[in-house]
Image (cartoon, rainbow, N blue to C red):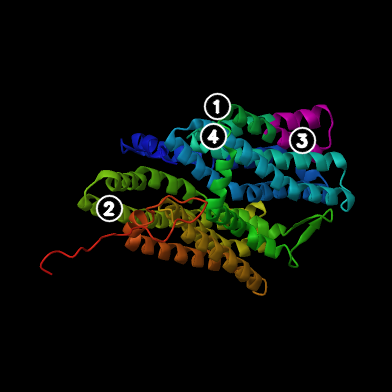
Amino acid sequence: MAGIGVRLNKIYSKHTIVTSIAGLGYSTVITVAPMFLVIFAVIIMQQLLGFSKLGYADRALYSSTVLYIFVFALLTASPFNAVLSRYLSDVIYRESYGDILPCYYLGMLMNVVLSSLLGIPFCIREHIVGKVSVPYVFVGYCGYMALVLVFYSMLYLSICKDYKKISFFFLIGMAAALFLSLILVKLFRVEVTFGMMIALTGGFILIASLELALIRSYFRENSGKYREVLQYFKYNWQLVATNFLYMLGLYIHNFVFWTTDMRMEVAKSFVCAETYDMATCLAMLTNISSSVIFISRVEMHFHERYKKYSEAVIGGRGIDIKNSKKRMFEQLAEELMNLVRVQFIVSVVVFFICIMFLPKLGFGGLVMQIYPCLAAGYFILFIMYAAIIFLYYFNDLNGALITALSFTSVTLLGSIFATKLPSIWYGIGLVMGSLVGWCMAYFRLRVMEKNLDTHVFCNGSIMKRGNGKRPPDKVYEKKFKITREEGW
């Protein structure tokens, strides 16, 4: 996300309270605004259309459908995001912009195929076994595929630094969804949950269409280099696995509790644990500001140090490389510590607000018992992800993969163990997994700090790699002849 720091530095340069608030607002817009826009739109829809007055079965079906749409759209998009992001960054660096459309089309095809392979069998079961009407199932499936395309296209606009336009598109799409839901339910007397599902799907389709139109306006040439994109998946398979494992780890503890006595089955197809899932949502929102803080700090400070180190490596003296490396890792340590300090203060304040006011709004009992442990887990988790991003900076793909694998595995095992504990410890699996992942990422960063020169200067090869017949082992032969001279 290089380039955000330039804008943030201009905002913060005046060092006033107003500019500090403006900087925080700008960071929020480019990070978490789309998520909050969707949440607000859904809540307002439910309030205006009398969602709470509907029968429990109808409300549960709608809520479960929306939950599955978001969770599995994120999971199916995760294997492609990181590796395509690297490919796009390399293409932009080479200024070969004609290679972007092949990447976009091929990545979209793979994402749609994977999402369909998961979505179609589930929808068939939802109709045949769950007895859900075909129109409702079809609209839910369309919403799922539309959100897949939304998440996929967001990657390309993020690379182009169009964060404000992404938020603007979400604002347009959710406003249109709210307006459409009112028309369908109030004017055409469509059933409430079906009308809300149609409206939400229409909003996602509108967002995906706007994103596609903007991408096509930026990139008009198509080089046709599709094979090169596939080769990136081959050589950077660690990125595919790391991003998928991280996203899986975010929800795997929920999946574990979906198999316990807390589970609720809807239409014999959807499975969830409403109490645990609500506590998870609250815990994630408690720590979501870490994304804003991380982007603000890293883009304003660390990226500049990283850039200076890279410039020193390309054409600097040995002493310049050594000094810039030292300053870069000092900045890295400072950014991690600042993230921990600031996020801890924010999380504690939000935690106490939730503890005091949420029970008055109906969020009490078991939800508030599970919430504290999960809040601690997500606090560590987001710090761990910041460390993974730093590993990406240094191209330590194996370290990032080991971190994600450790996090997901320990979270799975810890969550299975937590199901046998009292409810206050239900989130201990996430805490354990995040802590192990963070320790692994920190260890890899320390190893990278000690061996960065070897990593940067000794990973090349003298001969160009390729497929074919192996060259002969003998590379040099000295021929000489001894002659008998007179006097011997």
Q: Nearer the viewer, residue 288 or 327?
A: 327
- Looking at the rendered image, the disc whose residue lies closer to the viewer, 4 or 2, is 4
Q: Which residue is mark 1?
A: 221
Q: Position of residue 266 (x, y in %)?
A: 81, 54
Give the mark nearer the N terminus: 3 vs 2.
3
What amino acid is found at the position of numbered circle 3 in the picture? Ile
User: Residues under labels 4 and 3: Cα distance?
Assistant: 33 Å
Location of residue 1 in the rendering, given as x and y in whole percent from the top left corner: 45, 41
Query: Left or right: where does residue 452 sit relative to residue 188?
Result: left
The label on residue 198 is 3
Front-most of residues 322 and 292: 322
Pointer 4 with pointer 3, Cβ within 8 A: no
Q: Are marks 4 and 2 in contact (CB under 8 Å)?
A: no
- Between the residue at mark 4 and the residue at mark 2, the CA separation in whole angstroms equals 35 Å
Q: For the magenta stretch, what is the residue range?
A: 177-203
Chief SS of the magenta region? helix
Is 189 magenta? The answer is yes
Closer to viewer: mark 2 or mark 1? 1
Q: Residue furthest left?
A: 487
3D distance between C-alphas at marks 4 and 1: 8 Å
Q: CA distance from mark 2 to mark 1?
A: 41 Å
User: Residue beneath label 2, please?
Assistant: 327
Helix, strand or loop for disc 2: helix
Mark before the other along the chain sequence, 4 or 1 = 4
Viewer-nearest of discs 4 and 3: 4
Q: Nearer the viewer, mark 3 or mark 2?
A: 2
Residue 481 visible from this viewpoint? yes
